[in-house]
Image (cartoon, grey):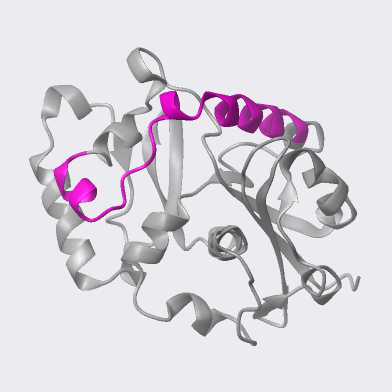
């Protein structure tokens, strides 16, 4: 691998022992991003326990890793984090972009925290170059064809898990270039593409939901999504 290449990894985390995890590895060279062919040519859904067998050879050049999974845990009933509660309000439920409650995927949540620990042992720092994202929300809210417009070649993804991992990898790329924003609290932060890349109707929906959120319930929730 050439030194001038920067690597970005996206992971759609699935079960520890099931072939439900998607991994996407992108490279940036001379301001353009594309698939890492030596991985992409044999890309397939893998067991979660095999993630590091796949990505370890690329981690030295990896700038950011973005994962679709609960990387932290909330407190109280249901273990929901503050941003998850906000994204579960009516406008997001109707738009089918609400996150799945952690209580419904306890084994995945435990596995995700193990994955975080393994990344931290390899020098990655949560919320810095190891981030959580939500590809369902990203795909729904971004302007049409924005993701594909960033790639030099068309997507070769064969499964839904791989397509979600591709979106995660794109968010990782945007994060390095200061084109992501956060939503969350000390119980966990979600990173999304900057709002200038969103569809107009979703910018309006989010702004309306933010203005109308109950103050006492969400007074600690913070975001810089409105910073262009």
* Residue 186, visible in the rendered structure: no
Q: Position of residue 65 (x, y in %)?
A: 66, 51
- Main SS of the magenta part reads helix
Occupied quadrant, residue 126: top right
Determine the residue positioned at 51% across, 60% down. 178
Hey, which residue is sitting farthest bottom in the picture?
Answer: 153
Figure check: 79 above or below 144:
above
Q: Position of residue 187 (x, y in %)?
A: 43, 25
For the C terminus, the image quarter is bottom left
Which region of the structure is painted magenta? 89-118
Determine the residue positioned at 31% across, 37% down. 222
In magenta segment, residue 106:
yes
In magenta segment, residue 116:
yes
* Residue 215, visible in the rendered structure: yes
Residue 30 placement, left or right of 167: right
Figure check: 61 above or below 49:
below
Hey, which residue is sitting farthest left in the picture?
Answer: 212
Hey, which residue is sitting farthest top in the picture?
Answer: 76
Residue 225 placement, left or right of 180: left
Hey, which residue is sitting farthest front in the picture?
Answer: 18
For the N terminus, the image quarter is bottom right
Occupied quadrant, residue 62: bottom right
Figure check: 19 above or below 169:
above
């Amino acid at each position: 691998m050439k030194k001038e290449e920067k690597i970005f990894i996206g992971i759609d985390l699935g079960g520890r022992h099931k072939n439900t995890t998607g991994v996407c590895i992108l490279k940036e060279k001379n301001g353009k991003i594309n698939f890492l062919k030596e991985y992409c040519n044999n890309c397939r859904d893998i067991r979660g326990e095999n993630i590091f067998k796949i990505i370890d050879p690329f981690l030295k050049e990896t700038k950011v890793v973005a994962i679709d999974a609960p990387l932290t845990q909330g407190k109280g009933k249901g273990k929901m984090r503050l941003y998850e509660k906000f994204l579960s309000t009516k406008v997001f439920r109707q738009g089918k972009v609400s996150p799945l409650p952690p209580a419904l995927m306890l084994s995945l949540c435990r596995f995700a925290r193990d994955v975080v620990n393994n990344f931290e042992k390899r020098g990655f720092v949560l919320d810095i170059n190891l981030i959580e994202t939500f590809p369902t929300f990203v795909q729904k809210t971004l302007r049409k064809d924005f993701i594909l417009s960033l790639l030099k070649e068309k997507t070769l993804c064969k499964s839904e898990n791989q397509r979600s991992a591709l979106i995660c990898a794109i968010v990782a790329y945007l994060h390095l270039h200061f084109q992501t924003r956060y939503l969350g609290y000390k119980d966990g932060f979600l990173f999304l593409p900057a709002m200038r890349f969103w569809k107009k109707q979703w910018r309006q929906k989010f702004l309306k939901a933010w203005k109308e959120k109950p103050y006492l319930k969400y007074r600690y929730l913070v975001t810089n999504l409105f910073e262009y």
